[in-house]
Image (spheres, grey):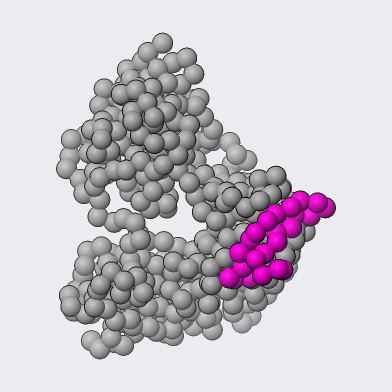
Amino acid sequence: MEREFDAVVLGAGPAGEVVAGRLGAAGLGVALVESHLVGGECSFYACMPSKALLRPAELAAEVARVPGLTVKELDPAAVLARRDEVIHELDDASQLPWLEARGVTLVRGFGRLDGERRVRVDADVLVARKAVVVATGSGAAMPPIPGLVDSRPWTNREATTAKAVPASLVILGGGVVGVELAQAWASLGSSVTLVEGLPRLIAREEEFASEQVEDALRAGGVDVRTGAKAVSVRRDAEVTIELEDGTSASGAELLVAVGRKPLTQEIGIETIGLEPGASIEVGGDLRSPAHDWLYAIGDVNGRSLLTHMGKYQARLAADSILGKRVELRSDGALSPRVIFTEPQVAAVGYTLAGAKEAGLNVRAVDVGTSANAGGSFVGRNAPGTARLVVDEDRGVIVGATFTGAAVASSLHAATIAVVAEVPLATLWHAVPAFPTRSELWLRLLETYGL
């Protein structure tokens, strides 16, 4: 059976939901195709459950910094129960009313492109009058290490939804997923070993951020091994990773967290001349240069693998489909990003090294994140650094990084400054309230010399 819609959206993760909802609210007929859970990876297997696992230890650390308060040991069973509540026991029923209110037709099943403007779902074919939007997201990458696949490793999905705390856990990969889940499971009593092949953790961020996160992980009992490359894996009574230097790491479970791959292998893009398994190239309006009816948003286009950036792209793609002129302005390495460890790492734009590599004439300005009156109340005596990367030629901020307790909320002001290219001389007149940690902006500008 063939059914016609104005737009067909393939994938109901955060990006797919947003573009479908925006188009539906504008009066278009929209089909949203999903074979698993509406809400996708972030809602059920990534952002939401990982933060639920991390939050109790973050609160405990803050309580320990405030005289007069005490905290009991964490209750792993209660933490896992709260995690299950956050992810709605892997039930997406609560996601559906929002779509229904916007007139979106949800089609349950695995969707594949079947030529121009056509998506096949089982025996049905959905035909798009205006656009097909691919929002199938990404999956965990598995490096070609001998024995790895046969060792039955965890991906983020198993690691964020496990029903019990593993006695021991080896994590392969020291990026965002690796450091967050290392801290989360260690705080709940697991013996965690974190193996990273590069010289430092979260290597795309500032070096001081890597050092502070590593210090915190070690203080929490995590065995951190950097510059350690895995050469083979085997599972006996435990899973064992053999490392290039002749040492090994063993645990009851192994989590692979070395990156993501676009989920385009099985969605039929070869029927329109694109390469299965590869990211779908798009322009500034999120449209494929090869097909004016095809859009790709979120992780699947490889531009910025972050939920909030996928939703941003979804809004732009919807507006483009509705006939508006759009421009992708916040993108790639310049996207705002947060690592929810304790200390948190919140960054936007360039790191100092990245700006120099881009040929910019920059200077870094650093202050202590809690070195102000507001720090007496939040993050008291907690380690942390705030850095601005300033383009000296234009007098604007091109990058910012904050580390410390609860710094994620500090990021949006920096994002506005970077995206809008607000001159430092103008920022000087944006007076922070006293006594809040927003005064770190005043300290940064004073240190710069204003």
Which quadrant of the structure image shows residue 295?
Answer: top left
> How many numbered discs, if any?
0
In the rendered image, the quadrant that contains the C terminus is bottom left
Q: Give the range drawn in magenta.
A: 225-247
Picture layout, residue 182 above or below residue 12? below
Camera-side residue of 429 and 339: 339
* Residue 263 against residue 168 in the figure, above or below: above
Is 303 situated left or right of 265 in this image?
left
Q: Is residue 112 above or below residue 89?
A: above
Q: Quadrant of the N terminus?
A: top left
Give the vertical position of 420 relative to 271 (above or below): below
Q: Position of residue 171 (x, y in %)?
A: 64, 59
Rendering quarter of residue 66: bottom right
Pick out the residue farthest to the right: 237
Left or right: residue 102 versus residue 184 is left
Decide if residue 436 is in sight here.
Answer: no
Give the x, y percent position of residue 35: 51, 29
Please give left or right for residue 43 compared with residue 239 in the image: left
